[in-house]
Amino acid sequence: MTSKEKNEILSQVPESAGAYQLIRLGVVIYVGSTANLRERFLYWTRKPKNPIVRALDWDRFRFVRTGTVLAAEHLEESWYRIHRPTGNLMSPPRRQEHCREHGMSQHNVDASRD
């Protein structure tokens, strides 16, 4: 993705809660939810250190603004059931449970993969 493409997309991504999809060649390869869609887009456009995350090699970022994190999580779960994306290491409910058990936010779990 060129800097120009990144900036074009970034100008459209809000700083609000929502769910998102990473897409490669028309196939959803990862779904997620976040309190800040813009920050999450920037996270995915950086060169992550983790080879699993780096290997996702997505070409499209699709998002839906939900207004609340809870609504974003529900949408993420729905998308996960529909698409079964290969890039998700844990199903959304399992990741949420893991975060609660370890006193972590979901962002920390995603960031720890990098």
Image (tube, rainbow, N blue to C red):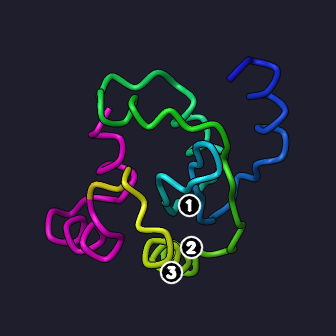
Query: Residue at position x 79%, y 38% from top?
Result: 9
Query: Residue at position x 73%, y 18% from top?
Result: 2
11 relative to 63, above or below = above
Alpha carbon distance from label 3 to label 2: 10 Å
* Residue labelled with disc 1: 35
Image quarter hosting the C terminus: top left
Q: Quadrant of residue 59?
A: top right
Q: Nearer the viewer, mark 3 or mark 1?
A: 3
Residue 32, horizontal then vertical, whole percent: 48, 60
Image quarter hosting the N terminus: top right
Looking at the rendered structure, the secondary structure element under dot 2 is helix
Query: In terms of sequence position, does the residue under pointer 1 or pointer 2 come before the other?
Result: 1
* Residue labelled with disc 2: 72
Q: Quadrant of residue 48?
A: top left
Looking at the rendered structure, the secondary structure element under dot 3 is helix
Q: Nearer the viewer, residue 57 or 15?
A: 57
Alpha carbon distance from label 3 to label 1: 18 Å
State yes or no: residue 61 in magenta. no
Q: Nearer the viewer, mark 1 or mark 2?
A: 2
Q: Nearer the viewer, mark 3 or mark 2?
A: 3
Residue 58, horizontal then vertical, whole percent: 56, 38
Query: In terms of sequence position, does the residue under pointer 3 or pointer 2 come before the other?
Result: 2
Left or right, residue 52 beside residue 101: right
- Which stretch did the figure color magenta? 90-114
Left or right, residue 100 beside residue 107: left
Query: Residue at position x 72%, y 67% from top?
Result: 65
| Amino acid on which disc 2 is placed | Ala
Looking at the rendered structure, the secondary structure element under dot 1 is loop
* Residue labelled with disc 3: 78
